[in-house]
Amino acid sequence: MSKIGQQARRVAAGFAAVVVGGTVFLGAIPAHAQGAGEGVVGGWSESAGTIDDAGTGMSVLAVNHRGAAERKTINGTTHKRSHGWTTWAGVQHYTRARLEHGSRIIADSGRKWGKSGTEALTVWKPFRPNQPGSGVGTAKTYYGK
């Protein structure tokens, strides 16, 4: 491939990353506005997927962050929790897991601080769709420093 073709391919790849990054960033605004706290660099949402470098200007290339919505049956009732993991080698950081429903926080792990690897999870919350704070919220995880 010619040099011009290689440059065009890099520009196209960079443009796609900006568009994808812009879409993800816009999806992140409500989650951070709901009080995840200062120092949030990125995270994961059950509904939106991975949210990295949420407009902070910080480099997150060395960060590996994952989140999961977990379900299990306890005494015949389905329960749900949010679970997050962050690996950020040599950097003091935190991971936080939440179940959120609109502006309501159903469960919050708080910030779990560490250096290199951190893990956070909420308590199990039962599905009770007809009661407020029922655990039917969206699992979200955050990381920052």
Image: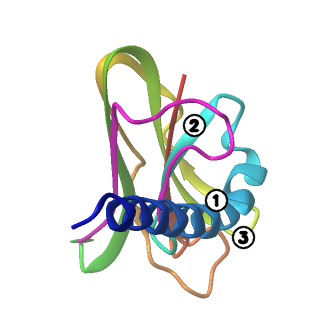
Classify 10 Å Cα crowding around label 2: few (below 14), some (14-19), many (20 and above): many
* Magenta-tinted stretch: 49-72
Look at discs 2 and 3 and give the one toward the viewer: 2
- Closer to the N terminus: mark 1 or mark 2? 1
Q: Which numbered disc covers residue 41?
A: 2
Q: Is residue 114 left or right of residue 111?
A: left
Kindly identify the amino acid type of the residue bearing the numbered disc 1: Phe
Kindly identify the amino acid type of the residue bearing the numbered disc 2: Val
> Residue 20, relative to residue 64: is it above or below?
below
Q: CA distance from mark 3 to mark 1?
A: 18 Å
Residue marked by disc 1: 25
Residue 127, position as x, y percentages in the image: 45, 78
Quadrant location, the C terminus? top right
Residue 55, position as x, y percentages in the image: 68, 44
Name the foreground residue: 117 vs 53: 53
> Residue 15, relative to residue 117: is it above or below?
below
Q: Is residue 111 magenta?
A: no
Q: Is residue 9 left or right of residue 104?
A: left
Residue marked by disc 3: 102
User: Quarter-wise, where is residue 130 in the image?
Assistant: bottom right
Kindly identify the amino acid type of the residue bearing the numbered disc 3: Gly
Residue 71, position as x, y percentages in the image: 28, 70
Name the foreground residue: 129 vs 65: 65
- Closer to the N terminus: mark 3 or mark 1? 1
